[in-house]
């Protein structure tokens, strides 16, 4: 399909979320269906299975380089020397990588021959940029393979405070659609980035638009503890390097037995999470890192043991000192804010306060 024809199709597409129920005259008086989370009939994998250290993708032993996409027990990870199409188009090939691919300039297309790059970039941003997107990579039992899933968040400021939170994984979304529930749907809102199919139309469009898609989007990981691990192992490194904004939440209620005391297993996991943020997502300048799943704190003083205060905040300090941040927020349940503020005051060694503690998810984790 010619880019000009595809652009016309994109601007005239229906922005309503595919598969959502259409309103009818009778639906006005009928009571709204009761929304429900994922059920066993939709996805028989328990939610909490992704909040444990044994979740596929957390440990490298559960990964297979170039593994089978139909194997539910092993993440099909990319090899370390994988060369993406974006690198090849950019001429970043080396002696052991493919040669640069020639790009058709598409001079026959008015979109490229008449519109300057600045105007094209504005169009790309309108089509699929400047969004806050829940992203996940999980094994889909209905399809029998590992698949990507995403959903544009319709409430960037108050997503966690809605009466019924937007679904953050495919099972919940499929269940509510099957039940014909529209309590989580805003009329006319585009929940899927259908415009990204434009990237497949030609190599020049792919080269121009991929950086804008990644750099202008805030990616949201808020399910269990494995999302950051999985994404860092299945997404090309040059794509990870384009990401500038992230919102990451880890639900630790099943892997930390006596909070805030840290055992060896949790410490290894915790440090690895921040290693990914430090090394593989080194261009992120806007980050909200949320620690969820801590039990309600009664307010009585915590008896810290040994170096545990430093074990908690050392990764924050190292990350804060690694780059110039636009925003670096560490979100803690409300009942723990005062306790961790005391830890920072006593133990922080960074010269400037480069991160701030903010109120995060309180109470029991969502959906467990």
Image: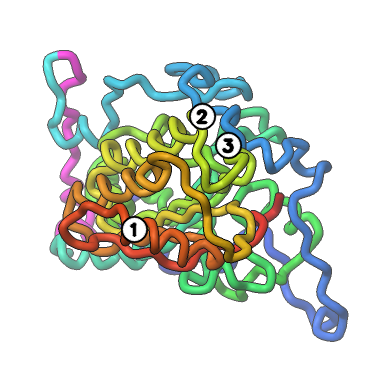
Q: Are marks 1 and 2 in contact (CB under 8 Å)?
A: no
Residue 334 visible in the snapshot: yes
User: Pointer 3: residues within 10 angstroms few (<14), some, or many (20+)?
Assistant: many
Left or right of residue 8: residue 43:
right
Q: Residue at x 23, y 54 (%)?
A: 109
* Region of the chain picked out in magenta, as a range: 96-114
Q: Secondary structure at mark 3?
A: strand
Mark 1 vs mark 2, CA separation in Å: 23 Å
Sequence order check, earlier mark of 3 and 1: 3
Q: Secondary structure at mark 2?
A: helix
Q: Are marks 3 and 2 in contact (CB under 8 Å)?
A: no
Q: Which mark is residue 138?
A: 3
Tell me the quarter of the picture where residue 353 sits.
bottom left
Residue 1 place in picture, x, y as percent? 38, 47
Give the number of the mark in front: 3 or 2: 2
Q: Residue at x 54, y 46 (%)?
A: 149
């Amino acid at each position: 399909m010619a880019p000009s024809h595809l652009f016309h199709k994109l601007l005239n597409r229906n922005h309503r979320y595919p598969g959502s129920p259409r309103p009818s005259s009778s639906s006005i008086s009928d009571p709204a269906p009761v929304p429900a989370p994922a059920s066993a009939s939709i996805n028989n994998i328990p939610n909490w299975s992704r909040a444990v250290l044994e979740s596929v993708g957390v440990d490298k032993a559960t990964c297979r380089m170039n593994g089978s996409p139909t194997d539910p027990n092993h993440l099909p990870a990319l090899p370390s020397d994988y060369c993406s199409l974006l690198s090849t188009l950019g001429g970043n090939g080396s002696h052991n990588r493919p040669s640069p691919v020639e790009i058709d300039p598409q001079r026959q297309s008015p979109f490229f021959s008449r519109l300057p790059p600045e105007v094209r970039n504005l169009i790309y941003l309108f089509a699929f940029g400047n969004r806050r997107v829940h992203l996940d990579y999980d094994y889909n039992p209905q399809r029998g393979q590992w698949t990507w899933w995403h959903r544009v968040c319709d409430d960037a400021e108050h997503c966690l405070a809605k009466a019924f939170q937007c679904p953050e994984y495919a099972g919940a979304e499929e269940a509510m659609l099957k039940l014909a529930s529209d309590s989580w749907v805003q009329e006319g809102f585009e929940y899927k980035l259908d415009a990204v199919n434009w990237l497949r139309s030609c190599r020049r469009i792919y080269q121009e638009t991929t950086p804008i898609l990644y750099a202008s989007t805030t990616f949201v990981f808020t399910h269990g503890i494995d999302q950051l691990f999985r994404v860092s192992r299945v997404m090309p490194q040059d794509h990870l390097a384009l990401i500038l904004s992230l919102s990451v939440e880890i639900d630790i209620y099943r892997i930390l037995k006596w909070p805030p005391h840290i055992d060896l297993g949790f410490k290894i996991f915790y440090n690895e999470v921040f290693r990914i943020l430090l090394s593989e997502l080194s261009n992120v300048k806007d980050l909200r890192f949320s620690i969820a799943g801590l039990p309600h704190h009664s307010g009585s003083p915590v008896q810290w043991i040994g170096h545990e205060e430093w074990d908690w905040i050392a990764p924050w300090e190292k990350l804060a000192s690694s780059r110039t941040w636009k925003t670096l927020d560490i979100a803690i349940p409300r009942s723990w804010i005062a306790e961790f503020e005391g830890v920072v005051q006593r133990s922080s060694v960074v010269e400037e306060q480069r991160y701030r503690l903010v109120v995060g998810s309180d109470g029991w984790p969502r959906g467990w």
